[in-house]
Amino acid sequence: MRKRIGIYPGSFDPLTNGHIDIIKRALTLVDHLVVAIGISAGKTPFLTLEERFALIEADLGPIAKKMGAKLTTAAFSGLVVDAADEHGANVIFRGLRGAVDYEYEESMVGMNRTMNPKVETVFLSASPETSFISSTLVRQIAGMDGDITPFVSKRVARKVLSRVAQNKKKASRA
Ligand code: ADP
C-alpha cells in the first residue's frame, strides 16, 4: 500500500504546545510527517535552524515512534507545494487558531491548489487548551522574564531562556 506522507510547514521559532498538539494529531493521519521549517533570507531567527530541528526531534521523535509513524525535519526556502513534492508529500497540514489564521490560509490554499493540484491542504483546528499560544508571544513573554512553562515543553523552555539570557548579555555589552 502507498505510504501517506504529510508536510507541516512553519517557523517553529520556538516549537510550542500548540504545534505539538497539531503534530501529534497529524501523526495519526499519515505514515510519515515532515516538519518543514521555512527559512527566509535576511530574517534572523530567534533560534537557529539546527536548534529548532533538534527540539522538534527530541520532543516528538519518541512520540512518533510510539505511534508507529515516522517523523523527520527539513528546511525549505521556496514554495510549500514544491517542498511537498520534494518530500513526496500529498498532504499539507496547517493549524487553525481562529478567524485570523483562516483568512490568511484561505487564499493560500486556493493558490497552492492551483500551483499543485496533487497536494491537498488539511486544516486541523487548534485544541481549546492550546489555541491561544503563539511563538511570537512565547518569545516576548520570555524576553520580559515571564513564565513560559505553560506554553512550551521543558526542553524548549530551557533553550528559550538560555537564548534570552545570551541576547541580554550581548545587548548589555553593546
Ligand atoms: P506562528 O504562526 O505562531 O509563527 P508557525 O509559523 O510556526 O507559527 O506555525 C506553523 C503552523 O502551526 C501554522 O499553520 C499555524 O497556524 C499553526 N499554529 C501555530 N500555533 C498554533 C497553535 N497554538 N495551535 C494550533 N496551530 C498552531
Image (cartoon, grey):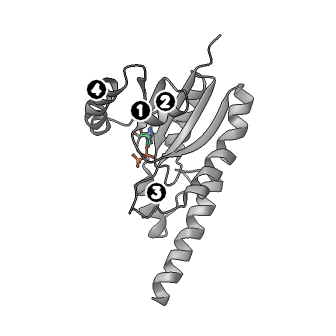
State left or right for residue 98 relative to residue 30: left
Q: Is mark 4 within 8 Å of ligand 1?
A: no
State left or right for residue 3 relative to residue 136: right
What kind of element bears circle 1? helix
72 or 164: nearer the viewer: 72
On the question of residue 128 being in view, the answer is no
Indicate which disc, 2 or 4, sits on the residue closer to the N terminus.
2
* Residue that label 4 marks: 110
Dots 1, 2 in contact, CB < 8 A: yes
* Residue that label 2 marks: 85
Q: Is mark 1 within 8 Å of ligand 1?
A: no
The quarter of the displayed image where residue 108 is located: top left
The residue sitting at 66% across, 45% down in the picture is 57
- Amino acid carrying mark 3 in the image: Val
The label nearer to you, 4 versus 1, is: 1
The residue sitting at 43% across, 34% down in the picture is 82
The label nearer to you, 3 versus 4, is: 4
The residue sitting at 60% across, 42% down in the picture is 73
Q: Residues within 10 Å of mark 4 (few under 14, many from 20)?
A: few
The span from disc 3 to disc 4 (Cα, nearest Å) is 30 Å
Q: Is residue 135 above or below residue 120?
A: below
- Amino acid carrying mark 2 in the image: Asp
The span from disc 4 to disc 1 (Cα, nearest Å) is 12 Å
